Amino acid sequence: MTETLLRADVPAGMQSDRRPGRPRDTALESAVLSATADLLLERDMKDVTIAAITERSGVSRAAVYRRWASREELLAAALDSVRSSVELVPGATTLETILNSYEQSSVAVEGRVGSLVKKRVAMGLENEALRALSWDRHVSRRRAPIADEIRRGMAAGEIDESVDVEAMIDLINGLYYYQFVVRAPSDPEEARVRIRAAVRLVFRGASPGVLRPDSKPTGQ
């Protein structure tokens, strides 16, 4: 059963420590997140309890209560703690910038990071609350620079202004997830060539003049 840490469960006197503007102990948070990530790699999600996390990290339940309102919130933070924000690698066009940036990020998704990314996908399918928290608190925020770059491409005339930015990001992200999470491992260079070709197809379809929302299919 999901272990939920509601504020109502926090003993009197403990809540008073959570004051607006109080500086956080980043070392303590890092210890909790690292311990949680380790446990997620070692155990099934149901066995990664707050008790196990406090024992592994050496941080008290009171401190955990002050920082994360639920176990799902903590698990989502831990799963995302190894991921860095998207760093755009500028190219001559938006297409080149997207390809450069995603390739750099995909190289980093190996070992511990890659395992936790796959774990997040699997756990999200089992736990709707965790999936929602991961999206709202972490994943959606990393999309912002990509969205800005796509809009820059629109302003530069590279991408049709009618394109749904969120849908375009979904298409591109889906290509990388399918390659690195779903598809069987293959030669890294072959994978890069395949993904670059697929991303170019997405951009070709998003080129000005290609999309005509008001047009009807041939034969109608």
Image (cartoon, grey):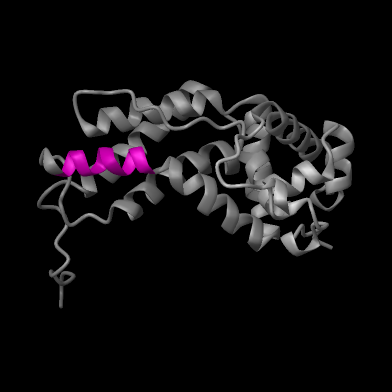
Residue 147 percent across, percent down from the top left: 31, 44
What residue is shown at x 41% (from left), y 31% (from top)? 102
Q: Is residue 43 visible?
A: no
Q: Please state the extent of the stretch shown in magenta in the rendering.
A: 144-154
What residue is shown at x 60% (from left), y 39% (from top)? 22
Residue 5 percent across, percent down from the top left: 77, 57
Residue 141 percent across, percent down from the top left: 44, 44
What residue is shown at x 71% (from left), y 35% (from top)? 33
Determine whether 206 is above or below 212 in the image. Answer: above
Looking at the image, how many numbered discs can be counted on the residues? 0
Which quarter of the picture shows residue 218? Answer: bottom left
Give the quadrant of the C terminus. Answer: bottom left
Side of 151 where 21 appears, left or right: right
Front-lying residue, 52 or 178 = 52
Find out whether residue 147 is within the magenta segment.
Answer: yes
Determine whether 220 is above or below 197 in the image. Answer: below
Front-lying residue, 67 or 143 = 67
Q: Is residue 207 visible?
A: yes
Determine whether 130 is above or below 94 in the image. Answer: below
Side of 16 where 199 appears, left or right: left
Front-lying residue, 133 or 63 = 63
What residue is shown at x 76% (from left), y 38% (from top)? 36
Give the quadrant of the N terminus. Answer: bottom right
Magenta segment, prevailing SS (helix, strand or loop): helix
Find out whether residue 30 is within the magenta segment.
Answer: no
| Residue that sits furthest to the bottom in the current view | 220
Residue 92 percent across, percent down from the top left: 19, 23
